[in-house]
Image (tube, rainbow, N blue to C red):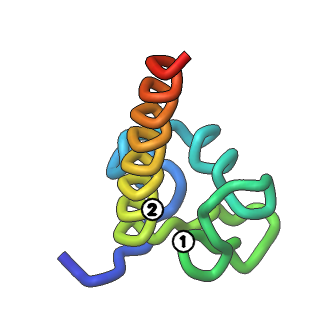
Amino acid sequence: MPEHEWLPTPAATTALGYSARTLKRYRDRNGGFLIAGQDWCFGPTDASSISWNITTCRQKFHERGKLMIGIDSVRRELAEVR
């Protein structure tokens, strides 16, 4: 597999296992953590599909998951202190 594989939205949803809505919700322009030019990019026309860097998106979803697990762990610890 190439180091950075770019796929259009329909193929990216299959490769990553997330819906198009989820991918688009996590773009930086919507306050998310997927960065334009690194993780996703527009096509050459307004009718073009967005392309997704499968490699970096997968890494960022993994990092986000680790972060959320850490937050949940801290919440449990704080709940025990009360």
Which residue occupies 43% across, 28% down?
Answer: 77
Residue neighbourhood size for the residue with mark 1, other residues' Cα within 10 Å, grouped as few (<14), some (14–19), many (≥20): many
- Is the residue 79 above or below the residue 27 in the image? above
Q: CA distance from mark 2 to mark 1?
A: 9 Å
Residue receiving disc 2: 60
Using residue 1 as the reference point, say whether residue 29 is left or right of it.
right
Q: Are marks 2 and 1 in contact (CB under 8 Å)?
A: yes
Which residue occupies 45% across, 71% down?
Answer: 53
Q: Secondary structure at mark 1?
A: loop
Percent x, y for residue 8? 51, 62
Residue extending furthest toward the left? 1
Q: Secondary structure at mark 2?
A: helix
In-front residue for pair 77/48 = 77
The nearer-to-camera label among 2 and 1 is 2
Residue receiving disc 1: 39
**Residue 51 appears in which quarter of the rendering?**
bottom right
**Residue 2 appears in which quarter of the rendering?**
bottom left
Instruction: Give amino acid for label 1.
Output: Asp
Percent x, y for residue 52? 51, 66
Which residue occupies 18% across, 75% down?
Answer: 1
Residue extending furthest toward the front? 81
